[in-house]
Image (cartoon, helix red, strand yellow):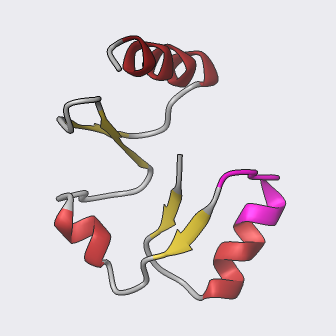
Amino acid sequence: MVGIAWAGTDAEMQGFVDKHHLTFPSANDDPGEIYRRFQIPQQPAWVFFDASGKMELHLGAMEPDELDAKFDELTRSA
């Protein structure tokens, strides 16, 4: 899992990471290139890829149990 910040400075992104105690890698996409490439219109959003490379876009926040279920589904299909 990688977090991608859409807008703001690197310092703002790092402040968010620190505030929420995120432990996964994060990157700043201030120009929005990644969001355009995957046609993501808003934050929060999740982009999942299965073992075949098929992409699934989920718009909006996800509860921890939803995210766990999605990861379980993706790892079972690998």
39 to the left or right of 12: left
Q: Is residue 10 above or below residue 41?
A: below
Q: Residue at x 20, y 70 (%)?
A: 36
Magenta stretch, main secondary structure class:
loop
Residue 65: give x, y in percent of width and height.
59, 15
54 to the left or right of 44: left
Q: Nearer the viewer, residue 3 or 16?
A: 3
14 to the left or right of 73: right
Q: Residue at x 19, y 31 (%)?
A: 52
Q: Nearer the viewer, residue 17 or 77?
A: 77
Q: Is residue 47 above or below residue 14?
A: above
Residue 47: give x, y in percent of width and height.
33, 44
How many marks the image carries: the answer is 0
Residue 44: give x, y in percent of width and height.
44, 50
| Boundaries of the magenta span | 17-24
Q: Is residue 78 above or below residue 8?
A: above
